[in-house]
Image: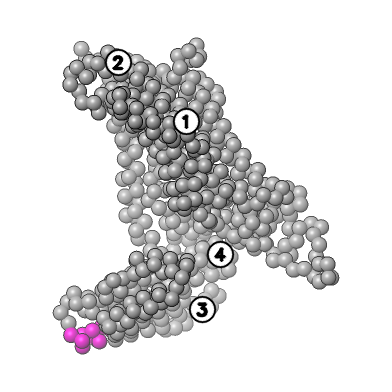
Amino acid sequence: MSDAGIPYSKDYWDLVGDQLGKRRSVRFATVVLVLLYAIAIFAPFLANDRPLSFTGTDFGEYRGAWRVAGAVANDLSGKLEGGEAGFVTWQAARTERGATLEGAALEDWEAAQLEAPTTYAAWLALDREALALRVTSMRRQLASEHMELLDELIAVADEAIEVASGATSSSDTAVAEVTVRLGELAGRVRGELRPARYGTEPEAGRTIALQPFTSYPVLESLSWGEVYFMLLWIGVMSWPIWNRLVNRLLLGGVRNRIRSARRPKVAAVVLLPLLGVIGFELLHGTSESDFQTSSIKEALTADQARSESVLFAPIAFGMAEQHPAEQFRGPTWVAGASLDEEGFFPGEERVDGQGLTLHRTPVDVRIGEADRNAAARHPLGADSLGRDLLARMVWGGRISLSVGIISTVLLVLIGTIMGSLAGYFGGWVDLVISRVIEIFQCFPVFFLILIVVSFVGPSVINIMLAIGVFRWTGVARLVRGEFIRLRGSDFVVASQALGVRSGRVIFRHVLPNALGPVLVAATFAVASGILTESALSFLGFGVKLPIPSWGSLLNESASPEHWWIQVFPGVAVFVTVILYNLVGEGVRDALDPRLKEA
């Protein structure tokens, strides 16, 4: 019988969702968590020393690219002149230098050696790539009449590499000729494309005026992973809107069609952002090679760049941007955190014990930043290097929240597989897996994670893996118990009688009915993962500087005098854990018929 025209009826998971929606604590916790994840995902647009948009000229960037372009072209010319014998000599010199190094210097040399060119052609290609990088940066500030010289320089560089590497039949004379042409063009670039300094008129034949360009530095700095998660977040958050439209307009409100479309919808939310990433990379590829000698904010402050229009992020401080004069400066809205023009706090001594006058570095207020004593300058204070604590907390949320989510996915995956096998097959399989679970539970999990991370090295990936590998046992026991309860059910026996493969019975029929306890455990596991990462980072086994996490921020100072260092990151960890616990309790109650609200 067709179900056309039959109104949509709610299934078990719809009813669970309704139960969750009735709980104010769950709604509140969900909204705040969504906001926290939005702040973490869109951190580059909220706290950054790069402008969101910039229109103007950047003398410092162009001058750096111009000077290096000439040097690289000359270096390439010298390599061509030296030939393969020069490459052999260069390799021998590197090997000889490596033999004299020890410790960290040797490790750095070995790491660089892995990326070092192994052929003469690759050696030349390095200079070609470096030259293209600078030329691309120069182009966007040049008038069209100067483009021909740069085009010719790149064309001759390509021809020189082809001739020298044997890609085309050539003689020593041809190599010499193209080498000379490359050197001449390098000289012309240095002589004809010299930028005129701000405040001076261009001199014909000697200097040129730079042309304004428009760029979006924050967008240009994004990685494909950041773009993917931004688009994914937008897709997930807009689900209630577009899902309702799809159900009504495309699926006609038919219940079976709506249910069968759930998986395609989830796949669309996960996969469609990949198309956005591809499009972003195609557009971003034209600007990712831009060569910058300093941030635009610093360049604007030092008059190395001038803007016609510029838009900064709401928090105009970078994740690792330092202001040495503001070391351990308290929140700027607190009395006693104001500074005078010389950089002294109110009532601070200006003469030392020997009667010598003390000198402090004045606060450097850069373009885009709030005034020296504005309440919005450092609303959460600054750390030991004068880095804005609010900006670092915004970026630190990325590490702390992602560790909680990813480690939970890993431990749920391991625990579900192990628990499913033990509960479904029983016998010796259950015996072996149960003994493994007991062995893992014999040791304090945190200290196991601490020992492993201390041996393999502190990093976010290692922390995620360690948490997932050592914390899966609780999920495994829950899943095992559910499978033992369900494996004798009629639908399981019927599937086995029909000859359905064990893997399909486990993951298609039994597991969906055993997911309730897993969801509850997963929610609490996220909170536990955040706490574990914070503790490891506080002990110095977390992320590497200058990347922050909420736990590593707590490690900046243990002095009560610098209370803001402990209070604000600690509150962020505490609130996030409480929110996840509220959601976990709500999920537990919604899945338990005895605890459901009437």
> Dots 3 and 4: beta carbons under 8 Å?
no
Q: Nearer the viewer, mark 3 or mark 2?
A: 2
Secondary element at image label 2: loop
As shown in the figure, which amino acid type bears the numbered disc 2? Gly
Label 3 vs 2, first from the N-terminus: 3
As shown in the figure, which amino acid type bears the numbered disc 4? Glu
Residues in magenta, as a range: 171-179
Residue at (46% x, 70% y) in the render:
102
Label 2 vs 4, first from the N-terminus: 4
- Residue 201 is marked as 3
Are there few (<14), some (14-19), or many (20+) residues within 10 Å of tag 1? Answer: many
Q: CA distance from mark 2 to mark 1?
A: 29 Å
Q: Nearer the viewer, mark 3 or mark 4?
A: 4
- Residue 298 is marked as 4
| Residue 498, quarter of the rendered image | top left
Q: CA distance from mark 1 to mark 3?
A: 65 Å
Label 4 vs 1, first from the N-terminus: 4
Q: Is residue 261 above or below residue 233?
A: above
Image position, residue 156 (x, y; %): 27, 78
Image position, residue 122 (x, y; %): 28, 71
Q: Nearer the viewer, mark 2 or mark 1?
A: 2
Secondary element at image label 4: helix
Label 3 vs 4, first from the N-terminus: 3
Q: Which part of the image, by quadrant, shows the N terminus?
A: top left
Q: CA distance from mark 3 to mark 4?
A: 24 Å
Instruction: Identify residue for label 2.
Output: 488
Image position, residue 592 (x, y; %): 45, 17
Secondary element at image label 3: loop
